């Protein structure tokens, strides 16, 4: 069959591509996983085209892999069985902003930063911030979270409804506009985080928030991970509504200084952000500072102007690239465990120890208010010795998390890299997940070979 010719029956010629550069761009994401090109890349412009493509692909048992912008970290968009890469960059419209309902309805190719620029005109913002400027479709499909989840939650808490095209081309709505519902099974939660394996999102309704009257950021330096984590946990126990609380270990701060020319003290550091009303915010910041100093913090500095805040968060968000730019040609293997807060300090300390023992370089940083952190290990994916050592560190960290009631992935998703831990983490519940997959995608055309074989 001439796949390109067949697809041009549903989509205009200029939006079906077999160009070598385009195929290569759709063969990989930001992870270390081995690239594999799709047979063809298609750029749909509306739901009807997606329906027609899926009907055709299902009839002919051709794999379809949805593609946002490829910022994923577990190989989710790699078309390991070939087929069609369905790129949503042209479905990039904000369909409706409803300020009174605090909702926005978007197409999946809308980018997070663009959405926030438009919402800003209404005094609103969308909270989920994975650092990378990801597409809303990709973020919903990975249940992305990031720095602000401690206050506002992950995608699961912020997606109100999905319009989904199922494998055989049927369109469903998984929710509605109501703030809560006890009506039937909660399908939105099932589809959020399904990594393109259960259905394809063509519209997403998101919860949005009013922009706070005041935003203040701060940096708090501690002599040990244990003290920093204890301080963070005490803060959360007091009910201070902190909007971001990020931990970077001493090695990570050193890398940021090298990459950006900043002069942060090279010790365990918490980056913080507070959102609120002027008077109450001043009290919260004062309380935090006192509590932190009692917990061993020896430097607490504010970043109250917007440039200082932007520099702080850029430094945090660019940590991944700060390592890669000083190691040309290398990649990063990212762990992404999430553990109960009572085990967090030990988990972070152990992770640093595992990296150091392996002889590899890397960062330990994370969204500690959620118990979620990343060890990013610098590797040459073509060097079997590097890979063996990094895989060992990854396994040691996941083993610690699973032994203590945590999960192998807090936000990056399963993709290819965390597949091997699924049985251990979910036991017999994995069979229930597989049965949902069989019901929704009986021919297994949707992103095959991801989450489970
Ligand atoms: C430097 C860096 C930092 C990061 N930090 C974070 C972080 O803090 N928190 C976090 O959560 N993530 C983080 N990530 C990972 C990444 O940004 C997220 O996984 C993001 O959600 C992926 O969005 P994307 O648009 O790039 O999706 P892609 O990578 O293109 O796709 C991801 C998944 O979504 C599916 N998909 C895409 N569109 C659709 C659709 N319309 N319907 C159904 N399925 C679809 C794909 O098939 C794939 O399975 C980071 C990445 C980088 C590079």
Image (cartoon, grey):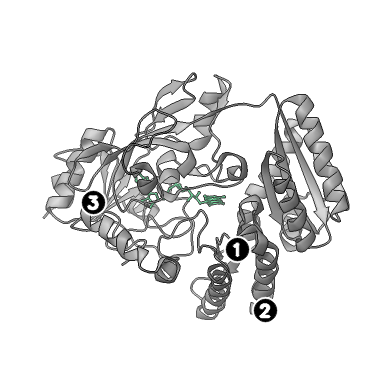
Observer able to see residue 264: no
* Residue that numbered label 1 is attached to: 376
Rounded to the nearest angstrom, the CA distance separating label 1 from label 3 is 35 Å
Q: Quadrant of the C terminus?
A: bottom left
Q: Point out the tag, 2 or 3, that comes first from the N-terminus.
A: 2
Helix, strand or loop at mark 1: strand
Above or below for 201 versus 103: below
> Is 222 on the left or on the right of 372, as rendered?
right
Residue lying furthest front in this view?
Answer: 182
Which sits earlier in the primary sequence, circle 1 or circle 3? Answer: 1
Q: Residues within 10 Å of mark 3 (few under 14, many from 20)?
A: some
Label 3, ligand 1: CB separation under 8 Å: no
Q: In the rendering, which numbered label is found on residue 277?
A: none
Task: First in sequence, mark 1 or 2: give its number.
Answer: 2
Residue at horizontal 84%, vertical 37%? 286
Label 3 SS: helix
The reply to whether the residue tagged 2 has its Cβ within 8 angstroms of ligand 1 is no
Image position, residue 57 (x, y; %): 17, 50
- For the N terminus, the quadrant is bottom left
Toward the viewer: 231 or 213?
231
**Mark 1 touching mark 2, by CB under 8 A?**
no
Considering the numbered disc 2 on the image, is that residue within a helix, a strand or a loop? helix
Residue 29 can be seen in this image: yes
Query: Is 31 situated left or right of 283 in this image?
Result: left
Residue at mark 3: 440
Label 1 and label 2: CA atoms lie apart by 15 Å
Residue situated in front as seen by the camera: 158 or 419: 158
State whether label 1 is within 8 Å of ligand 1. Answer: no
Disc 1 residue crowd, few under 14, some 14–19, many 20+, Cα 10 Å: many
The residue depicted at 25 percent of the width and 37 percent of the height is 172
């Amino acid at each position: 069959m001439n796949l390109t010719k067949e697809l041009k029956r549903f989509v205009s010629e200029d939006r079906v591509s077999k160009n070598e550069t385009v195929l290569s761009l759709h063969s990989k994401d930001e992870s270390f996983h081995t690239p594999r090109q799709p047979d063809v890349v298609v750029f749909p412009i509306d739901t009807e085209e997606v329906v027609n493509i899926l009907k055709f692909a299902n009839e002919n048992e051709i794999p379809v892999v949805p593609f946002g912008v490829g910022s994923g970290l577990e190989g989710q968009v790699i078309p390991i069985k070939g087929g069609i890469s369905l790129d949503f960059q042209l479905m990039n419209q904000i369909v409706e902003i409803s300020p009174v309902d605090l909702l926005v309805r978007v197409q999946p190719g809308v980018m997070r930063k663009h959405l926030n620029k438009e919402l800003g005109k209404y005094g609103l913002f969308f909270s989920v911030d994975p650092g990378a400027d990801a597409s809303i479709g990709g973020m919903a499909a990975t249940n992305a979270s990031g720095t602000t989840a401690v206050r506002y939650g992950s995608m699961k808490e912020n997606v109100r409804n999905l319009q989904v095209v199922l494998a055989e081309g049927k369109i469903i709505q998984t929710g509605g506009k109501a703030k809560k519902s006890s009506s039937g099974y909660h399908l939105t939660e099932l589809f959020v985080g399904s990594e393109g394996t259960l259905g394809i999102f063509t519209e997403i309704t998101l919860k949005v928030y009013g922009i706070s009257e005041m935003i203040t950021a701060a940096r708090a330096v501690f002599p040990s991970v244990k003290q920093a984590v204890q301080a963070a946990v005490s803060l959360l126990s007091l009910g201070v509504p902190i909007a971001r609380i990020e931990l970077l270990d001493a090695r990570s701060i050193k890398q940021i200084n090298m990459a950006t020319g900043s002069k942060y003290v090279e010790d365990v550091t918490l980056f913080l952000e507070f959102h609120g009303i002027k008077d109450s915010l001043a009290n919260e910041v004062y309380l935090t500072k006192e509590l932190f100093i009692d917990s061993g913090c020896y430097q607490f500095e504010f970043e109250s102007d917007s440039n200082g805040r932007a520099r702080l968060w850029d430094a945090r968000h660019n940590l991944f690239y700060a390592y890669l730019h000083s190691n040309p040609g290398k990649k990063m293997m990212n762990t992404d465990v999430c553990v109960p807060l009572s085990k967090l300090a030990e988990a972070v300390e152990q992770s640093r120890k595992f990296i150091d023992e392996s002889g590899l370089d890397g960062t330990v940083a994370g969204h500690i208010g959620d118990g979620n952190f990343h060890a990013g290990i610098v590797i040459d994916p073509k060097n079997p010795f590097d890979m063996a050592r990094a895989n060992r560190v990854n396994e040691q960290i996941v083993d610690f998390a699973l032994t203590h009631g945590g999960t192998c992935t807090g936000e990056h998703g399963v993709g290819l890299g965390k597949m091997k831990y699924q049985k251990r983490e979910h036991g017999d519940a994995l069979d229930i997940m597989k049965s949902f997959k069989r019901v929704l995608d009986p021919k297994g055309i949707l992103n095959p070979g991801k989450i489970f074989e």
